[in-house]
Amino acid sequence: MIRNLLLGLLMPLLLVACGQSTSSEGMARDEAKIITAGGTVSEIVAALGFKEQIIATDITSTYPADLQQLPSIGYRNQIKAEGILAWGPDLVLAEEGYLTADVVEQLEATGMVLRFFKKPQQISETYNLIKELGKFLEVEEKAAMLTAKLRADEAVLAVYLEANPTEVRPRVAFVMARGLETVFLAGEETFAASVIEMAGGEFAGKGFKDFIPLTPEAIVSINPDYLLFFESGLSTIGGKDAVSQIRGIDQTTAFQKQQVLAFDGHYLSGFGPRIAVAALDLAKAIRD
């Protein structure tokens, strides 16, 4: 507390002496009240030292865990401009496409500062996002440190994969479940394809893009060695014991060998600063 008090007393002098960098909108970043929308943006903003300045966020922002205690602005198209403006933010930082066009227009009309960032689906895009947010928030040194930590984690993953080769890469399918009646299979150009390949697995959902409804014919034809779920998704169908209720699953090698995996959704799919650690955990899980 003493250190913070001294910094508070000295800050005006430092501003005069050095000329503190402020945004193009004339606002000091380290004084801004921030609302974030999108779990990956929120995680990186917090990791760059702005966690205490986040005053509200969306329901996908689950890490760090204490972000879940903040006021919620909702989820994607449920978010209203009034629900953001009520908190009096200086900055809104969001993933591209997260807010509807009407909400963006209403917020911009107030003169509020909004910035949108592409959600990563591969690790190269994670590095880009860290750099972009570090530059915008004027903490490029912290961004460089976060980047270095990610590169170190990626190196640990590479060492593990080299030390633990497999004769045949295990085939892994990602299943997105929202109850037994709403089950999808991940295809190419998804986070699932990227993280499974990072983990040294063979992505099973090839020949189509994005997510498609999971049919018995589709899951039997790809016959994965492992089935990968979000923990939250698996819970909507009743847990691992209920996986057999998804038609066709019981005919797969994954089910017959009880090789059903579940990870925290944001940890696995966010492609934030922990993505190489998540990929390492997955790599270990598909080699047990």
Image (cartoon, rainbow, N blue to C red):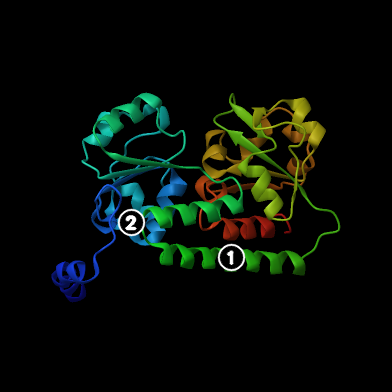
**Of 257 and 111, which appears nearest the observer?**
111
Asked whether residue 64 appears in the rendered view, the answer is: no
- The quarter holding residue 219 reads top right
Q: Residue at x 65, y 55 (%)?
A: 282
| Image quadrant occupied by the N terminus | bottom left
Q: What residue would you read off at disc 1?
A: 151
**160 to the left or right of 115:** right
Tell me the kind of residue under disc 2. Lys
Asked whether residue 31 appears in the rendered view, the answer is: yes
Q: Earlier in the sequence, mark 2 or mark 1?
A: 2
Q: Which x, y percent locates residue 265?
A: 53, 45
| 261 vs 287: above or below | above
Which mark is in front, 2 or 1?
A: 1
**Of 70 and 34, which appears nearest the observer?**
34
**Of 262 and 72, which appears nearest the observer?**
72
Q: Which x, y percent locates residue 205?
A: 73, 37
